[in-house]
Amino acid sequence: MPRILIAGCGYVGSATADLFHARGWEVMGWTGSEKSAANFAAKPYPVRAVDISDPAVTVAAARDDYDVVLQCASSAGGAAAAYRRIYLDGARNLLAAFPAVTLVFTSSTSVYAQKSGETVDENSAAIPNHEKGQILRETEELVLGRDGIVARLAGIYGPRRSSMLTKFLSGEAVLDPDDAHIINQVHRDDIATALLLLCEHRAETKRQIFNIVDDQPMLRNDAYAWLSEHLARPIPPPGKMVTPRQRGESNKRVSNRRLRELGWEPRFSNLRAAMTKSILPSFGFGG
């Protein structure tokens, strides 16, 4: 039975842990606090409170052998210092604690800084112009240099989580007539299946980068217009859209071809499918 340590049992990590357990893997979960660990008491696998940003704590907690370590701890949208502590320091500590184990690091498609709406893949330049992205790139290079795997996640949505839907329902959304911004997203559960595939094929995917994103990036204005029509609610008013700073000022279409060639197929191929089948029902709508 293969064994995996999931360092970061948050929104993505907990769903991923559930999937690995269901597929017959022996799972150990780490999370950042005792309070968070207590939330997993009913799970069929253990979850412990471990601060991966502390080298002494990480090494002391590394009592078992694993086939894979998955680093998917979140900075919770913190500042650059939090990115450095959770991602870069966390990767260093995990590599020190498990020097012979494959490390899979969940990064972000925000490292692509392209601005002209072009399609990017794993061979495209990834030279972020914001400090958070630069920290992610430094972490990626560290992991790849130690035979690890990098998974670049697009914007995450899923049950009870969609920043776009939340803004639409709260009245914060606007339609900017000058906005041609492309949104790249992926459903939480499709991230989990992609990570499982990468871990199952770790011998052939090591030292590689994979984009995890749905099949159809979409113009932000078109997404709001679709929500308006689908929910029979007023279209957002005109206004000036501000690009979220945490993902930089980029504007591109992210390709998932490399992951699909490995055999991955997302259950939710685009925003419309994810909204109707998963996200809207979780918000109390009929889908």
Image: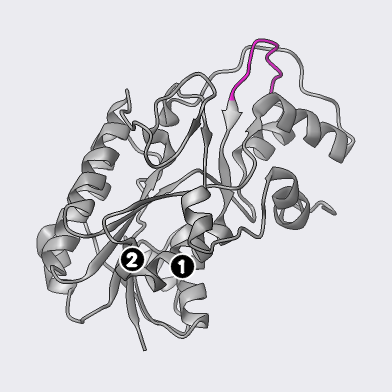
Q: Residue at x 68, y 12 (%)?
A: 239
Q: Please rate how many residues cluster around mark 1, counting C-alpha atoms within 10 Å: few if below 14, some from 14 to 19, many from 20.
A: some
Residue on which the image places disc 1: 197
Residue 84's x, y, as percent?
A: 22, 41
Left or right: where 167 falls relative to 129: right
Residue type indicated by callout 1 = Leu
Q: Residue at x 51, y 74 (%)?
A: 19
- Displayed quadrant of residue 131: top left
Q: Which residues are magenta?
A: 172-181
Residue 180 is a magenta residue = yes
Residue 51's x, y, as percent?
A: 23, 60
Q: Residue at x 70, y 11 (%)?
A: 177
Q: Residue farthest to the front?
A: 261
Task: Examine the residues drawn in magenta and state their main secondary structure.
Answer: loop
Which quarter of the image is occupied by the N terminus? bottom left
**Badge number at residue 204:** 2
Left or right: where 102 falls relative to 123: left
